[in-house]
Image: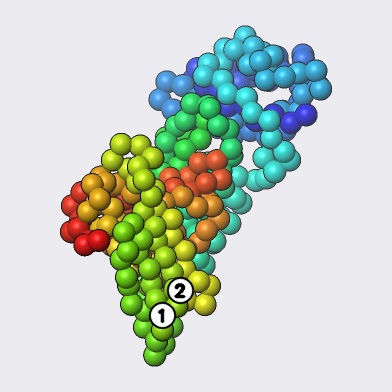
Amino acid sequence: MLWRVRTTLPDRPGALALLAEQCGLAEINILGLQIFPGVTAVTDELVLRAPDEWGPERLVGLVEAAGGTSVVVLACTEAALSDQPTRYVQAARAIVDHPMSFPEVVGRLFDADADRPGEAEDVMELTVGDVQVQLRRAVAFTGTEHARGAALAALVSDVLARTPRGEQPQSDRQPTYVVDADTVSALVDGAVVGVATVHEEAEPGTRPVTLRVDRDWRRRGIGSRLLVDAARLAQSLGAAEVVLATGSDNPAVLPMVLSAGLRGRIRMAGGELTVRVPVRDLRPLPA
């Protein structure tokens, strides 16, 4: 069985060799290795093939006996053996081609899309324009990973700054927006083509928002307008922030939040993408 093991070792000669020796004595094969250097300690990530009788607790004990601390052991697949520099080049190319896919791409790159509910989380915060993208995972991010993430976020900002905004598809039929209690609807010729609903508080001061736009009316700014109006409506209902949840592979979220001009926080964790937008400073939308 394959395991991904991340541990901190003292920065001294022979520390990694001792761990390798212990793995060899236990007939555990080291198939992959990443090293994240630090000042007084080094974080190592290893991909191990262990006999079937080895489980996470036993592997933790072996690594700790070899001098490792902060040991995290997670089951993995052969995908963990892919060449890391190649993964980063591929991620950069994907971001250049489709900058709005940034949350999904970095989520996969840093394993923030792995669903491990109930485990302690570490957070990496990356900024694109006024939007803050938060990646969360059980394993702590290293300084090297923070630097790589910041470089990719800067790449997105550069690409967006240099790329002219394309023309939105035009139509003689422009939507009108109607507020009814806790809902904002976009209507064309009396038919609803998009709707945003502000729900009851899920936690004090926070109101969930659900939003949909019919497929034929997407990429026209309707989603951004609905998000802004829903945020203003929530503010008039006494909310301090709104939260919108969707799948991590939804490419429309980042452009929608950027186009809305809102200072949102996009959180990636467990295959889910969550957008939180503070609404205290917004002008209330009359119900």
**Vertical placement of 184 versus 111: above or below?**
below
Q: Position of residue 43 (x, y in %)?
A: 52, 27
Q: Position of residue 282 (x, y in %)?
A: 20, 56
Residue at position x 40%, y 25% in the image:
39
Residue 190, labelled with which disc?
1
Q: Position of residue 60 (x, y in %)?
A: 63, 16
User: 11 or 236: which is nearer to us?
Assistant: 236
Secondary structure found at label 1: loop
Residue at position x 41%, y 84% in the image:
189
Q: Is residue 45 left or right of residue 264?
A: right
Q: Residue furthest top?
A: 65
Secondary structure found at label 2: strand
Verify CB contact (< 8 Å) between mark 1 and mark 2: no
Residue type pointed to by label 1:
Gly
**Vertical placement of 109 versus 42: above or below?**
below
Q: Would residue 151 be seen by someone viewing this image from the given angle?
A: no
Residue at position x 67%, y 20% in the image:
56
Residue 200, labelled with which disc?
none
Q: Would residue 70 be seen by someone viewing this image from the given angle?
A: yes
Residues under labels 1 and 2: Cα distance? 9 Å
Q: Is residue 95 left or right of residue 255?
A: right
Q: Is residue 21 left or right of residue 150?
A: right
User: 225 or 35: which is nearer to us?
Assistant: 225
Q: Would you name the residue on which mark 2 appears?
A: 193
What colouring style does the render use? rainbow
Q: Is residue 130 left or right of residue 115?
A: left
Quadrant containing the C terminus is bottom left
Residue type pointed to by label 2:
Val
Residue at position x 67%, y 40% in the image:
80
**Vertical placement of 175 versus 19: above or below?**
below
Q: Position of residue 231 (x, y in %)?
A: 29, 56
**Vertical placement of 8 versus 173: above or below?**
above
